[in-house]
Amino acid sequence: MERRASTELKPKGRKLTGYVARFDEPTDLGEFVEVVRAGAFTRTLAGTGAQNIRAIYEHDGRALLGRLGAGTLRLTEDAVGLAFEIDLPDTTLGRDLAHLVERGDVAGCSFGFLPVSDAWSEREGRAVRELTDVDLIEVTITASPAYDTTSVQVRASQPLGIRLARLYVEACQ
């Protein structure tokens, strides 16, 4: 599973809202540049498995915040990207997280996915990966996004994913 992060997160009372991915904005991941294309989540969100997409804290499946099938997580593709809204649970984690977001201590979002369709090319001497279809697995709230920018999807630390991407890029050259 691959992960990307963004730092647009807003508390709205007992809800968190933001964008976990922004379309058509290149992200420099070091080894290559990546772009999430509009519609990359459409198939996943329309599929029967979408009901199992979860919102979690720090990529920890035990720190559940919401689930699409329960109606406590809502995901929408719009012209900007993949927007989310989470109804925070009335738990210690939910209350603490709302407070941390309000203070600005936790300001990042991320998503875990498996690529279904991507295209590789080279621009200005750099490998570019365009994600056109992904299986979305999770939306996560994180204090440690890889990059501190509000409008860019970024990769969370994933050494195996980077190694696989390198091998793929090398094979395409």
Image (cartoon, helix red, strand yellow):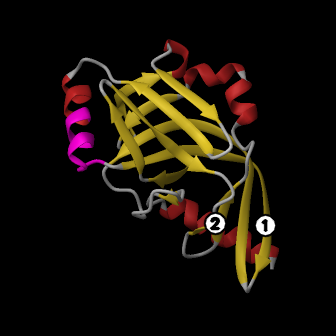
- Mark 1 falls on what kind of element? strand
Where's residue 84, x and y in %?
51, 33
Q: Nearer the viewer, residue 100 or 128?
A: 100
- Asked whether 110 falls inside the magenta stretch, the response is no
Q: Earlier in the sequence, mark 1 or mark 2?
A: 2
Q: Residue at x 57, y 48 (%)?
A: 21
Q: Relative to 74, say whether 144 is above or below.
A: below
Where's residue 63, x and y in %?
32, 31
Q: Nearer the viewer, residue 109 or 163?
A: 109
> Residue at label 2?
26
Give the magenta part as a residue range.
98-106
Residue extending farthest to the bottom is: 125
Disc 2 marks a residue whose amino acid type is Pro
Residue extending farthest to the top is: 70
Q: Relative to 1, say whether 118 is above or below.
A: below
Where's residue 110, x and y in %?
47, 47
Would you identify the image quadrant in which residue 56 lies?
top left
In the rendered picture of this protein, how many numbered marks are placed on residues?
2
- Mark 2 falls on what kind of element? loop
Q: Residue at x 66, y 52 (%)?
A: 23
Q: Nearer the viewer, residue 31 or 110?
A: 110
Q: Is residue 40 left or right of residue 151?
A: right
> Residue at label 1?
120
Q: Is residue 98 left or right of residue 1?
A: left
Residues packed near mark 1 inside 10 Å, few (<14), some (14 to 19) or many (20 plus): some
